Amino acid sequence: MTGATGFVGRALVARLQADGAEVIALGSRDADLRDPASLERFADVSLDRVYHLAAWTQAGDFCLTHSADQWIVNQLINTTVLQWWARYHRGTKLVSLGTSCAYAEGSGLREDEYLVGTPIADLYTYAMTKRMLHIGQMSVATQLGGRYLTLVPSTLYGPGYHDDTRQMHFIFDIIRKVLDYDRTGEPVVLWGDGHQTRELVFIDDFVRDMLAVDAVVNDDVVNLGAGVEHSIREFAHRVCAIVGVDSRAVQYDVSRYVGARSKCLDVTKVRRILPERRLTPLDEGLRITVEWMRERRRP
């Protein structure tokens, strides 16, 4: 597993190990995937699955100021994995993560549109590296054989997210700011007008569904979203209610970057694949996440 020290990676490693699997868990300190030789030591290892989760990016406006790095670093990472897979392990299924920003703005965000149209300009570079990864999987499988799967997550939340030294996805940023206001009175200022909408999937639900889809689907793209979205204002009000803060404390900075105004994945396919799929209720998942972040931020 590449990207094993990331948010999804840590949760997936824990789940696989709990199920009795032996996992070769690689973070950036274990293998510099910019180096084509970084995986050579695993050429002769017998593998049941390859999970490629590694990517070089951050949330927020990171993509706006790192377009060259985003392209070069992610292309190097993905090419290293694809080349190693094609050369040594194409008999092993390769499961990768795509991105919702690969869908063109205004599309239905359905899997048959993953490679169609132009992604939003602000996220274009990162989106295209993920499209190229998917095309790479298809190309290797077409010429050399092998199975693959691309799973597209919505924003994921829950315990185990990274620390505050990097830009955070919106829900963690909201929680952090509301907790800081509750403790110190520091103003809660959110980016945009708060009317942009997003969807959330609890991390444990995502990992469960990821493995369930992986078990029955090959050579395809599958969205793993919630299928319902809420405004940033609603998320902020829900977090304030959990923390016990008056939501009127939340301010909005319309001059700051907000990305796409709406981003809700079509989940028709995954509902067909997993008809009994159930997601953690939003308020329950937020409560768990708030308590986890509160404990970590105690003085």
Image (spheres, helix red, strand yellow):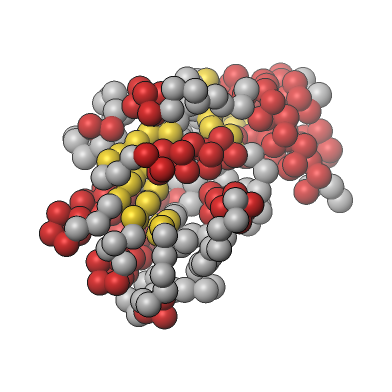
Q: Is residue 121 left or right of residue 117?
A: right
Q: Residue at x 23, y 32 (%)?
A: 112
Q: Which one is nearer the viewer's eye here, 242 or 44?
A: 44
- The image shows residue 240, relative to residue 152, as above or below, that is above
Q: Position of residue 18 (x, y in %)?
A: 64, 52
- In this view, 276 is above or below 1: above
**Visible in this render: residue 150?**
yes
| Residue lying furthest left | 143
Q: Quadrant of residue 139?
A: bottom left
Q: Taking the image as drawn, is residue 166 in sight?
A: no
Estimate the x, y position of residue 286 in percent, counting from the top left: 67, 30
The image shows a total of numbered marks equal to 0
The one of 100 and 47 positioned closer to us in this rendering: 47
- Residue 113 x/y as whole percent: 23, 32
Residue at left offset 37%, top offset 39%: 216
The quadrant where residue 73 appears: bottom left
Which residue is nearer to you in this view: 232 or 99? 99
Name the outermost residue toward the right.
299
Residue name at image x 15 percent, y 54 percent: 142
Left/right placement of residue 223 relative to residue 278 reads left
Q: Provide residue 203's location: percent of width, then percent of height.
A: 58, 40
Residue 292 vs 56, above or below: the answer is above
- What residue is at 50 percent from the left and 25 percent from the top? 277
Q: Quadrant of residue 22?
A: bottom right
